[in-house]
Amino acid sequence: MIEQELFATGIDYLAYVGVFVFGAVIGSFLNVCIYRLPLEQSIVFPASHCPQCGAALRWYHNIPVVSFLFLKGSCSFCATRISWRYPAVEILNALFYTGVFYISGYSLTSLVLFGFISALIVITFIDIDHRIIPDVISLPGIFLGFGASFILPWVSWQDSLLGILLGGGSLFAVAYIYAFLTGKEGMGGGDIKLLAMIGGFLGYKAVLPIIFLSSLMGTAVGIPLMFIKKADGGLAIPFGPFLACASLVVFLCLKAKQCCSYARINLASQDKDMLNDYTAQSFSS
Ligand SMILES: [Zn+2]
């Protein structure tokens, strides 16, 4: 019995390590996407090379995180510094995958969440670098979100469809009003498509909390930044990262709320069972 349990936990640990490594390998691919998608380069060909000297990387330069440490953060051909962001993205993606696996285990839901979170990571860093959210991710993302609603446990397809309309529509309204009042374009079309995609995956109930939270975070980060950089009043900071971050927080809150209500239902039914037992006992005696 005990041996069996030990064996089971051994398998569990192994599975978590496997998921972490898988997340890091996908994270390495995300780095390629972050670098190449905005430049409209192929994400498949050519194989990874140093952006500075153009030397093709050998297989042992491509091991997530490990290669970075092994090379002490610089290109082995031209010694140009490699950004710490490469291993950071790999570790971030690996941590998220491990968290998803902890919540959803071996399931299609886990696969969908892997894709959703990785898309958010790529969008976040591209938006930070270039102030754009590539349509090649957000537009297919809207359709994938709707498609995924047929297997995801937290949204029905109606919730998902409403989420897409509300997500796209509400930001479109905000952008329209902002442009109308200031005569400047503040919210990009990319943000609108991104929130439509997020609404598709998480459902309409998540949309308003996400707008609220991301605006709050944007303000909290934007105002100090404005003082530091003495930027003008226009929306100079990318909004995509805040939308991505807020949608993960809101998702976790909705998930936690769901768990609590399940627990309440379970407790309530347990109470009823106990009550039934008790009454049955008192009747029989
Ligand atoms: Zn180089």
Image: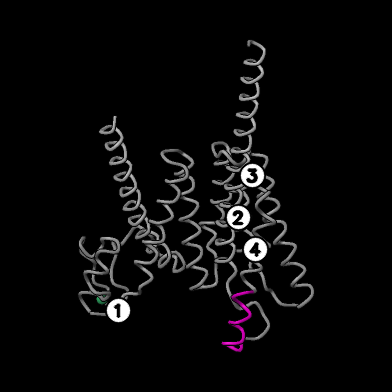
Are the residues tagged 1 and 2 within 8 Å (C-beta)?
Answer: no
Q: Secondary structure at mark 1?
A: loop
Label 4: how many Cα within 10 Å (few below 14, some 14–19, many 20+)? some
Up/down of 103 relative to 273, above or below: below
Tell me where the magenta segment starts and ends, as one range: 220-230
User: What residue sits right under mark 4 in the picture?
Assistant: 213
**Magenta stretch prevailing secondary structure:** helix
Q: Nearer the viewer, mark 3 or mark 4?
A: 4
* Residue drawn 62% across the image and 57% down it: 195
Q: Position of residue 92 (x, y in %)?
A: 41, 61
Q: Quadrant of ligand 1?
A: bottom left
Q: Residue furthest front?
A: 285
Residue type beneath disc 4 = Leu
Position of residue 59 in the picture relative to residue 199 (left or right): left
Residue 36 is labelled as: none
Q: Position of residue 232 (x, y in %)?
A: 65, 86
User: What residue sits right under mark 2 in the picture?
Assistant: 250
User: What residue sits right under mark 1 in the picture?
Assistant: 81
Distance in Å between CA atoms under marks 2 and 3: 15 Å
